[in-house]
Amino acid sequence: MKGVVILGQGELEIREFPDPEPGPDEIVITMKASGMCGTDLHHLREPCRRTEDKIFIEGHEPCGVVSAVGEAVHPQEASVGDRVMIHHYDGCRVCQYCRSGWTQLCPNAKVIYGGPNGHGAHAQFMKVPAHTAIQMPDGLSFKAGAAISCGAGTAYGAVKRVDLCGDDTVAIFGQGPVGLAATILAKEFGARVIALDIGEERLQMAKNFGADFTVNPLKEDPVEAIRALTIRGEGATKSLECSSNPDARRQAIQCVKRWGTACMVGAYGDISFSTQEIIQLQKTVLGSLTFSKNMMDDCAQWVVQRGIDLEKLFTHEFRLDQAHEAYELFDQQKIGKGVFVFD
């Protein structure tokens, strides 16, 4: 089979790999859709991975059909022909975090598929432990399932993390794939949404997806703009920072009102802010890392129940052999969210 590997410093290759065979507790997925995530760009831009033991197939938004199962896999876990999304983590499977479905928090033996130590979904097939498979509800497309497998699922996890309500005003910093998904879901929760980004195309997408207001931090002070849009100029009740930008992280804290909550969603990098913001103004700062297996299932069921169109998050579709073009456009922020599709 063919698979996309990212080597760092802007380099990637399409390589040949043996078709995977499942072990006793594993399954093989025939891929139908594999989303591109902003985390992929961190891998693309980092120092070169020159040793083969550090090179893995990219892609951690997997969605497809089970094509093979190991002899120890129970039919309730997975059967040939099942339409599934993949929770792209594995762990020791016995610690409290693994048992609760938060395998990404495992302190003992964490594997990230499509990340630093596990083959991912930008390939014709993907082999994973059977327990990572989440059955897709009827009515959920493969592309929507791929979105939920990381980007939209991460947005759902963050919205739940801050306990977003209909009477909230939420400022969402960064309207990339996760931020746009957060805008869609926050509106479905009934909140008033202020979307922020330095790209006018992404701000227009946020407006099309239901944002009540948009703010470009390059054109106006974002904290002052948010305060001007809120009751008595006090600020948003909650904020989600989805860009990983240090300035945006600080502004996400500054823009919320007294007793407000700021949630850091964008991965990597540093944060710097005055403790006066959280002590004297009684603010709460949270972090949110993706979602549990149960939450992934809940998100898929909720999206179908509400009739939410997550496919509109994808602005471009690519075939596997277009990987160079896809990531060049993605790295230059010339597209929204991309997805590799398979026959």
Image (cartoon, rainbow, N blue to C red):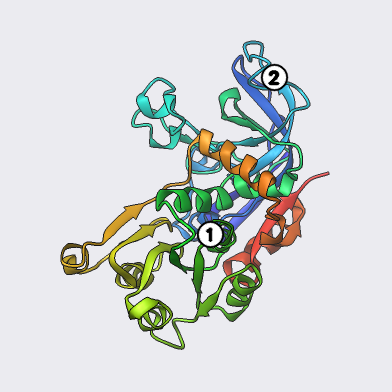
Q: Which residue is mark 1?
A: 186
**Residue 237 lies in what quarter of the image?**
bottom left
Viewer-side residue, 123 vs 312: 312
* Residue 122 seen anywhere in this rendered image of the structure: no
Q: Residue at x 64, y 72 (%)?
A: 205
Q: CA distance from mark 1 to mark 2?
A: 38 Å
**Percent x, y of residue 158:** 45, 52
Three-letter amino acid code of the residue under disc 1 = Ala
Residue type for callout 2: Val
Q: Nearer the viewer, residue 161 or 10?
A: 161
Q: Name the quadrant of the N terminus.
A: top right
Is residue 308 at all visible to an observer of this figure? yes
Mark whose residue sits in front, 1 or 2 = 1
Q: Secondary structure at mark 1?
A: helix
Q: Judge by depth and name the residue closer to the eye, 326 or 283.
A: 283
Label of residue 69 in the image: 2
Question: For residue 273, what is the image quadrant?
Answer: bottom left
Residue 296 screen position, x and y as percent? 56, 39
Rendered position, 106 above or below 185 = above
Give the residue at the far right of this rendering: 343
Q: Is residue 211 above or below residue 147?
A: below
* Front residue of 308 and 328: 308
Query: In percent of the image, x 71 and y 51: which residue is there?
Result: 307
Tag count: 2
Instruction: Provide residue 153's location: percent of width, then percent of height.
Output: 55, 47
- Crowding near the residue tagged with mark 2, few <14, some 14–19, many ≥20 C-alpha atoms within 10 Å: many
Taking the image as shown, residue 6 lies to the left or right of residue 194, namely right
